[in-house]
Image: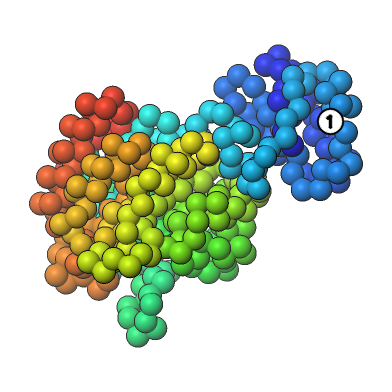
Amino acid sequence: MMIVMKSKATEDEIKHIVDKIEEAGAKAHLSEGKYKTVIGAIGDITLIDRDVLKGFGGVEDVVSISKPYKLVSLEFKREPTEIKVGDAVIGGDNFTVMAGPCSIENEKQTFEAARIVKKAGAQILRGGAYKPRTSPYSFQGLGEEGLKILKNVSDETGLPVVTEVLDPRDADLVAEHADILQIGARNMQNFILLTEAGATKKPILLKKSFSCTIEELFMAAEYILKTGNEKVILCERGIRTFENYTRNTLDLSAVPLIKSLSHLPIIVDPSHATGKRELIEPLSLAAMMAGAHGIIVEMHPFPEDALCDGPQSVTSVQFEEMMDKIKNLAKFLGKQGNFDGQS
Ligand code: PEP
Ligand code: MN
């Protein structure tokens, strides 16, 4: 159930409604929009009398949310959520490019990647310190040492960074070193991790599992929003199909669909979706055309030496070329985005 407050509702009137919801044993979630505050009543709402609520001062309307996901839904919040990270804004009319290696391997590689990312005009550096590898014998990431490298590179270059958190016990540590916490596809339904990551209050990049539905993605995001953290960026990174030429199949239809159901930003990862570097540019452009709020792309200064996901990492030259096309298309479509870059 959601309670839409009048644009002139006072703080006391809002607090009164919150108290009433909590007295009835439900949980109140405030969403302060540009013009109106909306209060979500979540949980057991059986003791809440809609007509009584409607009669309280400052209340414009009381509406039920038909979907199983509540805080994530467009019914709950009509205005698109925009998330500010450094100079970048993710969501709304903005197009944001996150790029960098699959994993942090050493300081030299990370600095070089950051230099290329920044020069080409992308806004956020990616790089994994904790890697969810299919094989336990593959490189698992540098762990805390990788986080320190990432933070150091971020401080030196001014680029905000996104990195994955694999274990709920590491959520605070990762939050101390990164600007955005990534929850990987394999952990999309790790509900303890979702809650712990949400509680850090950092923006969360939530990747859609390759074997889950859009509704399951929304329900996973709901766990994060329920912690009071609304800064969730959804990510389509390919789903499992019978096609073998690509690693997964990029489901671009998810982009406009998600936008029609949720206020949260949605970005696309063509790297893990395809596993092939030659497909990254066309699918990045297609993602923008489909209405995505950005992309996350693997780029390695020396992909042939990469410890992880080399074949899907674009080279610096490929990245610069695709960024030129992205900037042109963004201009054509009237997208916002700070693509200035600097060497
Ligand atoms: C990654 O971004 O490095 C990654 C492992 O992605 P995914 O969780 O989508 O497989
Ligand atoms: Mn990868």
The answer to whether 318 appears left or right of 173 in the picture is: left
Q: Residues within 10 Å of mark 1 (few under 14, many from 20)?
A: some
The residue furthest front is 242
Q: Which residue is mark 1?
A: 50
Q: Nearer the viewer, residue 180 or 156?
A: 180
Q: Quadrant of residue 24?
A: top right
Q: Nearer the viewer, residue 107 or 306?
A: 306
The residue furthest top is 8
Q: Position of residue 83 (x, y in %)?
A: 47, 38
Q: Secondary structure at mark 1?
A: helix
Q: Residue at x 53, y 28 (%)?
A: 79
Res 278 seen here? yes
Vertical side of 30 occupied by 216: above or below: below
Q: Residue at x 47, y 42 (%)?
A: 258
Q: Position of residue 333 (x, y in %)?
A: 26, 27
Res 314 seen here? no
Q: Position of residue 135 (x, y in %)?
A: 37, 81
Vertical side of 203 occupied by 291: above or below: above
